[in-house]
Amino acid sequence: MKIKLKPFDSLISFFYPRLCPACSSILQHHERVICLDCQLHLPETDFHEVDNKQLEHVFAGRVEVAKVASLFSYKKGNRIQKLLHNLKYNGQYELGVFLGEYYGKILAQQSWISSIDLILPIPLHPKKEKQRGYNQSEAIVRGLSQATGIPYRTDILLRTTHTGTQTKKSRFSRWENVKEVFCISDPERIHEQRVIICDDVLTTGATMEAAVHKVQEAKSGEVFVIALATTQG
Ligand SMILES: [Zn+2]
């Protein structure tokens, strides 16, 4: 087979090589967003394919959810932490779509997924979204939707107030901080609908808990929680 050379592309990639956002190695032509080696060594959990009690435990006694699933383990310095950092802070929207699609292909093989009516991303405050240019959870949900065929909406679950960084606050003050930050623009649209709420990372679950409450206040059907990655486990 003859390989068609693209001199202009080669020149561009010589001066501006595309780098893998997880390990910074130069991407080859056939590597779409991350390098093959990183793709083969992404830190997957088994929280997406079993009825895992460990993740469901996060919401026990707090809010009722039908299922909690997450694909990757999020740890300081691991590939997923680097990828999500690039997604959030380096403008790499396509990376979110890629990861969402990757997860969506796995979810599409599970029987429960066919019963879902709608996917809702956890929204960013509009001010933050303007600074970042996009909502990283929306990028992930776009990929999930492409792979599963389930529609998503970004204009139903909305954020109401600006919340500061959550990392240094206690669980209680985080809850105080987030419990009224969401609202539902169109309760009719999710009435009796089986809904996935999706976030990039599941940590204490406080943000997700607040979102689930709001969706259930609108008398949705069962609520499923999905995070691309989790710090649990
Ligand atoms: Zn890599």
Image: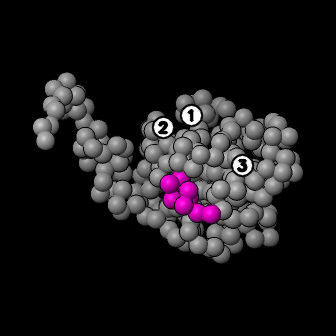
Q: Which residue is mark 2?
A: 93
- As helix, strand or loop, the secondary structure at mark 2 comes to helix
The amino acid type of the residue labelled 1 equals Tyr
Residue 224: where, in percent of width, then height? Answer: 70, 58
Q: Which residues are the magenta region?
A: 103-111
The amino acid type of the residue labelled 2 equals Tyr
Locate the N terminus by quadrant.
top left
Along the line of sight, the residue nearer the viewer: 72 or 160: 72
Along the line of sight, the residue nearer the viewer: 190 or 112: 112
State the count of labels: 3
The verdict on label 3 being within 8 Å of ligand 1 is no
Q: Is residue 175 above or below residue 18?
A: below
Q: What is the CA distance from the residue labelled 2 to the residue labelled 1?
A: 7 Å
Which circle marks residue 117 in the picture? 3
Residue 204: where, in percent of width, then height? Answer: 66, 62
Residue 64: where, in percent of width, then height? Answer: 79, 64
Which circle marks residue 134 in the picture? 1
Give the colour scheme of this rendering. Answer: one colour
Q: Are marks 3 and 2 in contact (CB under 8 Å)?
A: no
Q: Would you say 192 lies left or right of 140 here?
A: right
Q: Residue furthest top?
A: 8
Upstream in the sequence, badge 2 or badge 1? Answer: 2
Which dot, 3 or 2, sits closer to the camera?
A: 3
Q: Is residue 193 magenta?
A: no
